Amino acid sequence: MALTGTKTFLNYIGGEWVDSASGETFESVNPASGDTIGTFPRSTPEDVDRAVAAAKAAYEDWRLVPAPKRGEILYRFANLLMEEKEELTDLMAREMGKVKAEAGGDVQEAIDMSLYMAGEGRRLFGQTTPSELRDKFNMSVRMPIGVIGVITPWNFPIAIPSWKITPALISGNTIVFKPATDTPLLGERFVELLVDAGLPSGVINIVHGGGGAVGDRLVRHPDVPVITLTGSRETGVEVMRNAADNLKHVHLELGGKNAIIVLDDADLDLAADGIVWSAFGTSGQRCTAASRVIVQDGVYEELQSRLVAAAEKLRLGPGWEDDTDVGPVINSKALEKIHSYTEIGKDEGAKLLTGGEVATGNGFEKGNFYRPTIFGDVDPQMRIAQEEIFGPTTALIRVRDFDQAIRVSNGIKFGLSSSIFTRDVNKAFRAMRDLQAGITYINAGTIGAEVHLPFGGTKDTGNGHREAGQAALDVFTEWKSIYVDYSGKLQKAQIDTEI
Ligand code: UN1
């Protein structure tokens, strides 16, 4: 299959590749070069309706396929991802822009997740418990829910669909998948591989198009009882509101404004490496990116100069070139937003230490390249220290002591990832307890979550759910409690209290 070019792609509904009812299209564009990757259907609510109907019909049989058999399909899918890892990595560097090492990691995360969820096919544990009555057996089992609406972002175009789709499938649900319009080809490849792995018709459906026509219809469709979305806080609020009329289960994974704390006793080499990796990896376009660095007085100057020197050494370039450290950002709108925050930071009185500009020359004009940016002397209340920028910009905040560091780290509306560099085990444990976030790292940056642990955040990062790990199953199943009375007589719970 050609990786780039103007090939036209289709939706996949009920086991067939089909055009949109609209006949209209949009293009996926390489963020480093401006080249067209492919043309995709700009789908309509009508297309969503067809996909939901197909998924609803397929659910009737899929829910009855034994879970270990569903797992075998996911094992095959994981194997196909392994076989295609190199091709998908290269495609991701071109369609999404991340550097090859990270693109490979994105695919690897999907392989890990698929293997993990394939294994769930032989677990999906419930509980067996005693009964309060004689000759009675009690248990709880996980039940699938139905058609799941999956809405994914462009920043982890293979990993995040796997976080949502593999637990949904192993649990016996069927899917209507709307990938981000910036990375439709990766979404399409994901589905192709699931189909090649042997998923029956209608179990997975993909409908390309925007949030307005496709996403909104999925969110409001009465036959889609569960919506899982990774996106912005604003989109999350809108989805929750629009899903409310049907009392849908909504799983939201939203923003972050993650901080790394560096105390006076930290290993500074390690901290500097962790900060550069977490702030500028994926060009800062991770929900888990370190967009704040909270530094204790005693090491502030030293760390600041090390970070500026390290940021200035990073090589900007297309993700597919081996010596690139930082790739482009996703599109021109993102570039504008990132730059507008540089202006906001300057206006607020923060000190721009390095970067702060769109990269020019060297062919950079063809893509969306922004220089790694560090602000110093940032006040914790400034907008650049409170709002998610989603780009290669980080803010250094000076603090007196550990307690102030924790307060500043917690002093935001989000609660996804957090980190502390210290050699003091007591402070490390207090940080594990007191940082208000779904994820805390000790002596590591804010990125690097593994698939067998819950992923998600507190406060405005979400609505209390987690993806990945066992926790993901709670989003895609409902508990059923089952009571089997084999006494042959009417026994009354809470009433027949004699033993
Ligand atoms: C995201 O930022 O949206 O821990 C996902 C990490 C990755 C996943 C990030 N494994 O940064």
Image: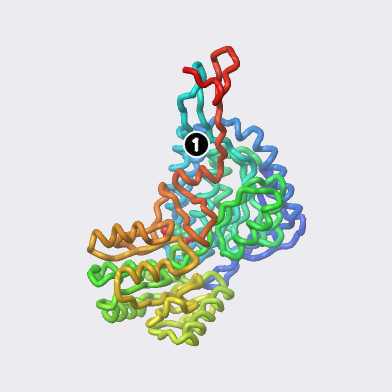
* Image spot of residue 148 (x, y percent): 62, 46
Q: Position of residue 137 (x, y in %)?
A: 50, 22
Residue 376 at what x, y percent from top left?
Answer: 38, 82
User: Residue 295 versus residue 497: which sits nearer the camera?
Assistant: 497
The quarter holding residue 29 reads: bottom right
Residue under numbered circle 1: 71
Q: Is residue 487 left or right of residue 321?
A: right
Q: Secondary structure at mark 1?
A: helix
Which residue is found at the position 29% from the left and 72% from the top?
401
Quadrant where the N terminus is found in the figure: bottom right
Left-right relation of 492 to 411: right
Vertical side of 40 occupied by 246: above or below: above
Position above or below: 415 against 314: above
- Say which amino acid is labelled 1: Gly
93 or 306, which lies in front?
Answer: 306
Q: Would you place residue 275 above or below residue 23 in this image?
A: below
- Can I make out residue 101 in this image? no
The answer to whether 312 is drawn above or below residue 266 in the figure is below
Residue 25 screen position, x and y as percent:
70, 63
